[in-house]
Amino acid sequence: MSINQSIKPATAEVKEHLMIGGCDTVELAKKYGTPLYVIDEATLRGICREYKAAFKDYKNIRMMYASKALCTSAIVRILDEEGFGFDTVSAGEIYTVFKAGINMSHVLFNGNNKSVSEINLALDCRVGRFSVDNFYEAELLNRLAGEKGVKIDVLLRITPGIECHTHDYIQTGQVDSKFGFDLSQVDEIVTLITQNYKSLNLKGLHAHIGSQIFELKSYYDEVDILVKEIARINNKFALKLDEMNIGGGLGVKYTDNDTPPSVTELAESITEAMHKYGVDIPTIYIEPGRSIVSTSGVTLYTVGSSKQVPNGRKYVAVDGGMADNPRPSMYQAEYFAEAANKPLAEKKETVTIAGRYCESGDILINEITLPELEAGDILCVYNTGAYNYSMASNYNRVEKPAMVLVNNSHSDIIVYRETLDDLISHDNIPDRLSKK
């Protein structure tokens, strides 16, 4: 079974308490406090190696981690050690990767509205590829690169017209999308780049069809479209484009109802689509994010108050919620959890796990059966490695949690918990408001 097909990290085991990475999760909660993001290094490295093994027979594959899923200096260093490049979408992600000491030729800058300052940073850091998303950006990239006297390699991001059966907010490849060029616009932008934009070197096409995808046919269809479009462009414009970035999006197993394909099945679908044409094998970039880091992460919470609604649900509140995991509120995402301090206790009570924030919609899990929970119990929510820390906020002026990396019974802080002073560190009171 592939790691993305498991709800729990590979090292999760039940003793008196729940153990992850050889560490007692209850002791982690005591040492570092809660809420606490926990990343299992063995699981993270394991899925990286699954991807490399699955594509080992395709000679021109480039693994690019989608940094938006989780981008910290330590995570970047691990992915680099495992042979991954980085798909970045902001100055913050570029700077994190740069400061971690990564070879920037292995980095791609993606996004639909890159600012002048972000582009200049990417140029100064010598990012290896730029994904061009629209006409405005193509002109801007050409001008800024020209001002610096450099020629940059670019891919054209296109919308292939594929709609995946996933949440509307995480579909990206359908025709009506904010991302990329429509196929009807491709000839116009190729003409501009080849004839007018002398600071841009067109290398290939880039597409992304969505996130949390379970349908392998979507990838097969995407490759089919990209191969045909590259062949058409090469023939019409006498070019030799030979790079295809097919994005990422492979799903993971959040609950027992989820049935994501394995990494091996994904690789087979993609390579089958390529071999169908018998053409010179282009370089394929693949950009997994969620499926790389999600399963390796859990979040630990401390149980607080509870409320039994007469003739209704029982709510059990924890010390986190929508600010450290907004996905249930945004996408109606579902999660699985266990009582970390009593994992062997009988599960006999169906409850709704509520967050601490001042929103009625701050619900982490609807109606899950757990042991009877009491204040002070530690709750472990699984599969929170992707998009939880990345999307975290300071809503209600609450400090963001710490993150620890566990491996071989050892734990290390990789993101420090915010303090109250951190919260006000960028505040400023104008002189005219100073106390008399």
Image: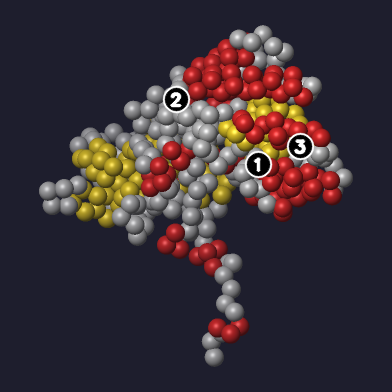
Res. 433 in view? yes
Residue that badge 3 annotates: 192
> Image quarter for residue 289?
top right
Alpha carbon separation for disc pair 3 and 1: 12 Å
Q: Position of residue 93 (x, y in %)?
A: 64, 46
Marking on residue 214: 2
> Image quarter for residue 71?
top right
Residue that badge 1 annotates: 134
Q: How many marks do you count on the picture?
A: 3
Q: Residues within 10 Å of mark 3 (few under 14, many from 20)?
A: some
At x 36%, y 38%, the residue is 334
Q: Position of residue 282 (x, y in %)?
A: 70, 19
Q: Secondary structure at mark 2?
A: loop
Question: Closer to the N terminus: mark 3 or mark 1?
Answer: 1
Question: Closer to the N terminus: mark 2 or mark 3?
Answer: 3
Mark 2 or mark 3, whichever is nearer to me:
3
Mark 2 or mark 1, whichever is nearer to me:
1
Residue 385 drawn above or below residue 435: above
Q: Amino acid at mark 2?
A: Phe
At x 43%, y 38%, the residue is 168
Q: Secondary structure at mark 1?
A: loop
Q: Nearer the viewer, residue 117 or 287?
A: 117
Q: Amino acid at mark 1?
A: Asn
At x 60%, y 27%, the residue is 246
Q: Position of residue 277 (x, y in %)?
A: 64, 10
Question: Closer to the N terminus: mark 2 or mark 1?
Answer: 1
Res. 42 in view? no
Q: Nearer the viewer, residue 190 or 38?
A: 190
Mark 3 or mark 1, whichever is nearer to me:
3
Q: Position of residue 122 (x, y in %)?
A: 74, 45
At x 39%, y 24%, the residue is 259
